[in-house]
Amino acid sequence: MSEVNQAGRDASPQEKQRRRPSREPRHAMPTQTAGERVQNFDEVALGYTPELARAEAERCLQCKNAPCEAGCPVEVRIRDFIGALIDDDLPRAVAVLKERNALPAVCGRVCPQESQCELTCVLAKRGEAVAIGQLERFLADWDRERPRAQRNVTVHRPECSHRVAVVGSGPASLACAGELSLRGYHVEVFEALHVPGGVLAYGIPEFRLPKEILADEIDSLRRARVLFHTNAPIGAIASAEELLEEGYAAIFIGVGAGLPRFMEVPGENLNGVYSANEFLTRVNLMHAYEFPKWDTPIMRGRQVVVVGGGNVAMDGARTALRLGAQEVTLVYRRTQTEMPARDEEIEHAIEEGVRLVELAAPLEVVGEDGWVTGLRLQKMELGSADASGRRRPVAVKGEEWVLPCDTVVSAIGTLANPHIHEIADVALNEWGYLETDEEGRTSNPRIFAGGDIVTGAATVILAMGAGKTAAVAIDHALRDKQ
């Protein structure tokens, strides 16, 4: 008996393939070797070839209920773009992908798909999920490399008269601006720095997210009628309320949570101590890695210690290696198992030579003549679980030692900027973040917010989801007034 499709016709070979359970192993993405990549700032992952992308796509079961899509904060139609890729219809695959994701090349590189869309993939129950993020990256890069006239152009609604201001240009803001533009609004983005992109520009190293790719995605928004103002810090040049008085119909605030959290130990003011924000901003946004072409000062330590266990800590440690450090040590108060960083980032760091000191917490930055000479550490052990569900680190009395180093990078998180009240006079929660409802609406019904300034530090894709949700709410609010 022949197989038939939903329309009652004989199924095509591609449709038959989609229904067969996949026994193929996941196709690994080619990368630079560890020895090669620590010598440069080029992208570590080299991307799928068309053949590898097609082979990986064909592992997809094309499930009727597409559980992977429930794990995507921006609701990308994953099954459909992979189905188009299986059918070798790359233009359609790109169109489906970009229909709901304004930054596919970025998300394909830095989003933790393993804890979101890939986590709910049916294949993950008994083996390895489909490499959704790597397929997303492949399609975005394929489209980007085409001649300009052939590239995907998302269809926009007719223009409306409303102007919306977006404060900040990180992932939440870019997603909000892109969605509002699709819905016909005149969107203007105000960025305090000289380059748009927010944490994508200053926080993520070139070897994970090449800046030319970020710039290209932002240029796509410009072509979609989004206007960017740089060197324009809202709160200094105008408040959100003043923007409303100037004629903007609504405001979205997506300024992130960029205030560094410090270790709060003696010696933290010694020369050679950096917050991860400063360290990565000097390297990424100010191109310190391209010295002397770019004359940005940064200490290139020989013995570098990075304190923390998240993705930012991995970025700091791997960046220090590429700047020429002879030894880079990652100090974390729990064990590798409890680290919040992506497994891939931890594995890459260890492959490249980063040394991990587990169950250790900083007590004091030791120095001589004003310069760092070491970090005094406290031995820890794991106790009972805390509110995060991870076992709480507890000090082991009498077990301290000094780890020699000349540079310390603190990568233990960020906080909301205490000057957020200068941007908008809206309600804050007890931690200083903006309070919003589920749609991103603040205590002022014309001011919305999303991303890290609402939730605290989170992922790129969660911030984008918040920006998109707020854009939909803004659209509904403004259209209801017409």
Image: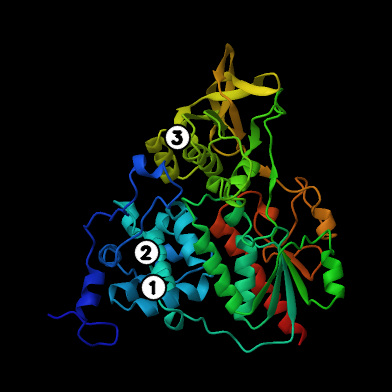
Among the two numbered marks 1 and 3 on one chain, the one whose residue lies closer to the N terminus = 1
Q: Which residue is mark 1?
A: 81
Label 2 with label 1: CB-CB less than 8 Å: yes
Category of crowding for the residue at label 3, using alpha-carbon neighbours closer than 10 angstroms: few (below 14), some (14–19), many (at least 20): few
Which residue, as the protein is rendered here, is positioned at the far top? 398
| 385 lies left or right of 141 | right
Instruction: Look at the numbered discs 1 and 3 and tell me whether their residues touch, using CB distance below 8 Å.
Output: no
| Residue nearest the observer in this picture, 106 or 145 | 145
Q: Please name the residue shown 33% across and 59% down the image.
A: 130
Question: Which residue, as the protein is rendered here, is positioned at the far left?
Answer: 1
Residue 222 coordinates in the image, percent (x, y): 61, 75
Q: Residue at x 32, y 61 (%)?
A: 48
Residue 178 drawn at (x, y percent): 60, 73
- Which residue, given by chain and number where applicable, does mark 3 sit on? 337
Secondary structure of residue under mark 3: helix
Q: Position of residue 146 (x, y in %)?
A: 40, 76
Q: Earlier in the sequence, mark 2 or mark 1?
A: 1
Left or right of 174 in this view: 239: right
Disc 2 is placed on an element classified as helix
The image quarter in which residue 150 lies: bottom left
Q: Is residue 96 visible?
A: yes
Q: Is residue 48 left or right of residue 480?
A: left
Label 2 CA crowd tier, 10 Å (few <14, some 14–19, many 20+): many
Q: CA distance from mark 1 to mark 3?
A: 34 Å
Q: Nearer the viewer, residue 124 or 206?
A: 206
Q: Which mark is residue 135?
A: 2
Which amino acid is tagged 2?
A: Leu
Residue drawn at (32%, 79%), measured in percent from left and top? Answer: 89
